[in-house]
Amino acid sequence: MNFNKRKSQAGFTLLEILLVVVIIGLLVGVAVVRLGARSGEAKVVAARRQIDAYKTALGLYELDNGFYPTTEQGLSALIALPSSAPIPNNWKGPYLDPAVLRKDPWGHDYIYRLPGVKNPTGYDLFSPGINGVEGDDDDIGNWQ
């Protein structure tokens, strides 16, 4: 047997492999931290875009009927003819395509109020934000 042949064979030691695994782990950790912040920003942008879509639909509803849905009728009036007063005579919905009320990026319902607290001459439309609690600093609404 030739033992010298074994020593000349190329290969990685356990220490070298562990070092590479640690380096890869550190790189993944840094990427997750950086992308985690971006994910939060992307959800805020997504909520704002959905609010814009609802604002457009509410504008079309008001254009057709001369008034916005009441708080009680809510955003559901955009996808189905309301059955409570005031019943619109010229409803041409659904005003959303697809005719679905979406939740905000954190899984909460969007909140609609007429008249609004932030917009007393119009309506408030907002997401309660990441914590789901309305009225605090992370709300995302049509007044921003």
Image (cartoon, rainbow, N blue to C red):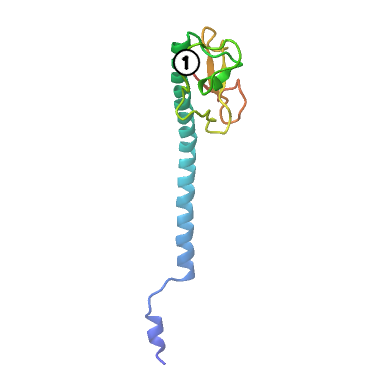
Q: Residue at x 38, y 85 (%)?
A: 5
Return the residue nearer the eye: 50 or 35.
50
Residue receiving disc 1 = 61
Label 1 sits on what residue type? Tyr
Where, by quadrant of the figure, is residue 70 drawn?
top right
Return the residue nearer the eye: 55 or 14.
55
Q: Residue at x 45, y 66 (%)?
A: 16
Lateral position of residue 72 relative to residue 55, left or right: right
Looking at the picture, does residue 10 appear above or below residue 116? Answer: below
Return the residue nearer the eye: 117 or 122.
122
Return the residue nearer the eye: 100 or 23.
100
The spot of residue 14 in percent (x, y) is 49, 69
Circle 1 Cα neighbour tier, 10 Å, few/some/many (<14 / 14–19 / ≥20): many
Looking at the picture, does residue 104 appear above or below residue 23? Answer: above
Residue that sits furthest to the bottom in the current view: 1
Q: Residue at x 49, y 43 (%)?
A: 33
Q: Secondary structure at mark 1?
A: helix
The spot of residue 63 in percent (x, y) is 44, 11
Report the quarter where the N terminus lies. Answer: bottom left
The spot of residue 2 in percent (x, y) is 39, 90
The spot of residue 28 in percent (x, y) is 47, 51
Residue that sits furthest to the front in the current view: 89
